Amino acid sequence: MSFIHLNVASAFSAHYGVSWPKELVRRAAADGADALALTDRDGLYGAVKHLKACRDHGIDPILGVDLAVLGPARPGPSPRAGAEAGRLRTEGRVLVVARGHCAGAGYRALCRLVSAAHAHTVHAPAARAGGASAPGTLAVQGPRPSRHPGVTGADLAAHALPGLPGHATAPVLTVLLGPASDVGLAAARRDYARARAALSRWLELLGPAALRVELTTHLSRPGERLSTAHALRMLRTAESLHVPAILTNAVRYADPDGAATADVLDAARSLTSLEALADLQPNGQGWLKSTAQMEALAREIARDAANPRLAATLLRNTAGLADWARLDPAADTGWGSPKTPEAHVIGITGDPNTELAARCEAGITRLLPHQARDRTLRDRLALELDTIADLGFAPYFLTVAEVSTMITALGVRNAARGSGASSLVNHLLGISHVNPLAHGLVFERFLSRERTTLPDIDIDVESAQRHRVYRKIFERFGPDRTTLMSMQNGYRARGAVRDAGAALGMDTGDIDAIAKQLWRFPASSFRAALAEKPELRPLAQRLAATTDPHTRPGTPRQLDLLVDLTERLDRLPRHISMHPCGVILADKTLLDRTPVQPSGLGLPMSQYDKHDMDPMGLIKLDILGVRMQSAISHALAEVARIHGDGHTVASAGHHPLPADGTLPPYLAPNGTINLDKIPLDDEPTFELIRSTHTLGCFQIESPGQRELIGKLAPRTFNDLIIDISLFRPGPMKSNMVKPYLEHRHGFAPETYPHPDLRPALAETHGVTVFHEQVLRTLHTMTGCGLAKADVYRRLLGNPSAESRVEELFRTRARERGYPPRVIDQVWETLQAFGSFGFCKAHAAAFAVPTYQSAWLKAHHPEAFLAGLWEHDPGMYPKRLLVAEARRLGIPILPLDINRSHAAHRLEHAPAEGPGTGTTTGTAEGRGEGRAEGRAEGRTATGGTGPHLPQRPPTPRLGIRLGLAAVSGLSSTEIRRTIAGQPYGSLPDVRDRSGLTRTSLRHLAALGAFDELQHAATGTPGTGSHQGPTTLPPRPNRADLLKHLAAIPPRNLPAKYRPLPGQLPLPFHDAGIGDLELSTIHSTEPAPTPGEIVRTELDLTAMDTTAHLMDSHAPLLRQLGTTPAARLLDLRNGTEVLVAGIRIATQTPPMRGGRRVVFISLDDGTGCIDCAFFHEAQETAGPLLFGTRMLLIRGTTRRTGPRGISLQALHAWDLQDTASLPLPHPPATHPPRSPSPEGPRT
Amino acid sequence: MGLFTQSVEVDCTPAGQPLRLRWQGREYMLAAEPVRWYERRRWWAEEPRAQRGHGPGLVDQEIWRVQVRLAGKGPLRTFDLSRHAGSGRWRVIRLHEALREGA
């Protein structure tokens, strides 16, 4: 008979277990075991993977959990340190195993017990979830210790012995008291009395049927913890109270090799080095030993107990418990049977199919009234409804529709994404805004009778509203039917190298420097990466030096170990967190099917992740917070607020009015724009897109996309869909881009393998880009039907199944009379396409916000940028979008205690003209940038917009910085400050705003009191550091800061504080104005522009008064660099020097698999995208990923009519002045002064 | 107690339990039931590599404490022997004057 392991922790015991469930099951099955338990720490995180692995290997799964037991705190000093704050303290850990073959009673009790263990915990995202509760290693998170999961004896009894009315209380859980339990800990101390007392308390609590003593020997040194002697002492205790004993091996790794990884995990969990770690495992024997080895251990215990019969008894008891706990996945855990919310919850009474059909009819009336009798539409709707009815998924669609309707009713922007856009039903239910018939989207790509898994419908919502949406869903469906999905966060290279380095006790600075050089490769291939990645060369050289025996002792050896340990940690789970978008909806049995624990939001989250949903029949809705939707929402609100009515909006945004002078259909009289109704053929929008000045636009702002869009030059919405589809790993790798562009631009004639394929491939000029085209191709040539075609498509690229598809394709195509040459050619395309390519429905869904954001940027750039600053949706640092506003000539209005709101808002700025204004910084110094910005789809400089009327000059709109951008300002401070506006004087601010001294100082440093100061001292309200220098020195920000630091903290007692809304002193009344401010004397030198920029970056992460690069202007002049805005004037292939701040680093997938590193620089006049190919990577080495400000030499590459990028040859660290190529090399371009040159028109 | 690491030849029972050892040219017979355990190693300080697949014997080593008499006669002596996980080679790692304490 095989031995069955009942105490097995997998990698899902974070920072504790080493092996994945499938490795453990594989090893157990290979050894002939017919069952295996998984008993992870604190949860069932690996349970579904375990069930699946057991199914795959044909053995019985057993589930349990390893939990801390909480007991009442004892008065006086606790014998063990690290007792929890609060009333409860940890009294060791126990194992709880669920009973099987009992219609799920055991599994249900296990789920509920685990949820109870977490119910009192406070979520700490960085908490070492699995192991922090190990006795003696309680990690403290933040100022208050977050309490760790655990159960009381009463919890255990309540769940183990449910005591159904009318039934004898047969236990559904068994509690195993092992070496880490209170009994085991007392035994380890040779405290027999306490061990016996503890065991008799357990007996009293649970009775003999639900209790076992678990013996484990790791054959550690006699007398130590986990020695045979330790097991023997526990055995004596068990025998004295007649509690049966079983045998386990407290497994943490599948094979002996995992022991070292377990050591590193122990060190990481305890945040200490291996050398300093007090409770390392005594040795490395905690692996999944074979039956023969476990029997030998049983005999060894029996021998030491001098009881020859004991070995058999231990093994028999273990097998007996295992048999009791064997699960039937379907009957016990609900494996594979989907559960949707009950009909009454989604508000239907009749047949769900009838209800769904009725709602679709209503949708036709609402959305497509003119096509109500259209044959195509009717056929498609019938096909979809039949399929949905056959699969029994109508309740699912109605549930999603219910959620979507609810979100819309909250006034939150939402849109379906993904293949859900292929469904007409989704469109008619209002879930998706894309009409699949208009874009040739194929339903079978989304759902068919050939696919039995639930389809995914993903809904994008405004990121800033996502949590509100989640809470509403919990309210709507009830907390017993709703939970969030979780995700496991595994070790990646950087985290792995940090923890491995800490375990080895290496210098943190050194480790940090190494970690920064690791760039997007799995930790498991660290050593291979060392050999080939140029940025790791210094590290590789240090490693090579390790052969030298005279190098510093310890260190070189450590580097080799560091690489090994980093590789060992690869992908191991570190902690669980809320999945960014998954919400699970089910019927009221949900919490019997999944354990839950608090998430960072406070709402419960399942311990199961996305891979567990389908097997467990859990229905997941992806509700993804999309920052772009929030940015759009803010922009639209600002447009409506600042303009006030539809006609003003139309004039400001150059929206053509219908002939009768009414408003266009997308524009409401109150100035609200409905983006879902804007025309999809707006020329200024496409002009903007083609200009490649698409920073901030959804999906098309990355350097690679800007290059592609420059080449592709989209003219229609469908072009955008194609563009988005092409910029994917599949098309990039299988060389679809080049032929497509050549055919599109007419450089090469379109070709089709066969005329029959023309209808499917015409929209992309004969190149296969979309999944939908693969389906149609397969269907056309084999007649297999689109549903089967999607099954075949999914098998492409699968090494074991692709040949079957090929055979079928070739046979059927031959039968249908296609010539061998055509069959070969088409198969080659299909094979190259693999399972890559892109689903057109995904792209169509993406293209909607892409187009909408470009439309906003073309027509309302100020509002759009305010939205971008507010919600920071893109890939770039926010400061680049500030630079973009500066490039577009949009006034950036500084923080002002009287004008700033919480958010960045639009404000009418003084009209443009020399010598004006509150415009901060050096917009004037960038005249050319402004001129160019205006030319983008606008008409201010004339000429470029033939479709637009010339507009009369309107007051310029600027963006006023919001208070929320200042780091450290609390939401309460912001609320009170705004409620108190306006303020007449500095004392007034201090008295009424509730700002702390630190906040006051920060605001002063940022110039928020400049206006008050100027009013008080009678100087004109200009930017602080500008203005005539001939005047006597006047007090500046530095003086104000000094003053603020000197005055004692003081706050008016509450009764003297003005009430909110009480009128402040008259604003600009100099006489009684601001005595405090007017008496400050100027003693400090005014901060330099460079200092001001530094302050701004420190406090708001944005350089708003001037560009960070401005202070480098003299150096750049010396070097002879070319500004980004000038690159387009140069010939293709010109060698130039450019300099700027790194804003993005990308390593997109490339044809041929060779890595190309794209580094984008911002120099204040625009973006420069530099491609580093293999050789340039070699010369740049560690500069590739580690350096912030770069000087790059390269040759220009034209990428399209308006696009240019750089092929890099060499790079320098701009801040490492000594290394720079000074004096400047033979100038390929005359050095230009960055001084104002005026608009080029 | 002396600390050693010296090669030693050990004959074992079929179950892998030491029976006899030859050390410094003399043969010792086991005089009592030996005690076996696995003892942790400070591998991070002792080993140059710890790569995945390094194999057993990195984290711990098998130790046998044997009580022996020279040629079955002579005084009782206590040795701690280690068996290398990979090669199966034996070494003497400790030599006790007398056995002080067991479990």
Image (spheres, coloured by chain):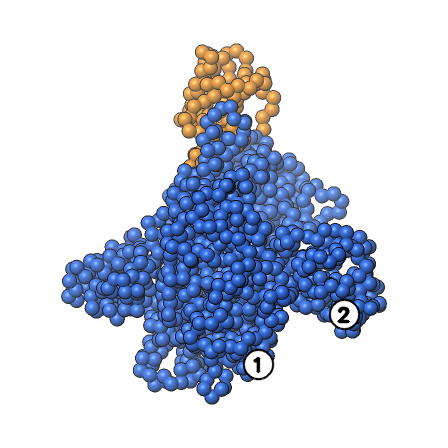
Chain colours: A blue, B orange
**The image quarter in which residue A842 lies:** bottom left
The residue singled out by tag 2 in the image is A1068
Label 1 element class:
loop
Q: Position of residue A178 (x, y in %)?
A: 57, 43
Q: Residues within 10 Å of mark 2 (few under 14, many from 20)?
A: some
| Residue B102 visible at all | yes
**Left or right of A661, for residue A977:** right
Residue at x 37% of width, y 71% of height: A716
Amino acid marked by disc 1: Asp
Residue at the extreme bottom of the image, as rendered: A660
Q: Nearer the viewer, residue A1093 or B86?
A: A1093
Determine which residue is flagged by label 1. Answer: A645
From what the image shows, is residue A672 above or below residue A1112?
below
Describe residue A764's horizontal placement relative to residue A90 as left or right. Answer: left
- Tag 2 and tag 1 share a subunit: yes
- Numbered disc 2: what chain? A
User: In x, y percent, where is residue A541?
Assistant: 46, 33
User: Where's residue A1117, x and y in %?
Assistant: 52, 49
Residue A1223 horizontal/vertical position (percent): 50, 41
Q: At 43% from the left edge and 62% from the top edge, which residue is drawn?
A: A692
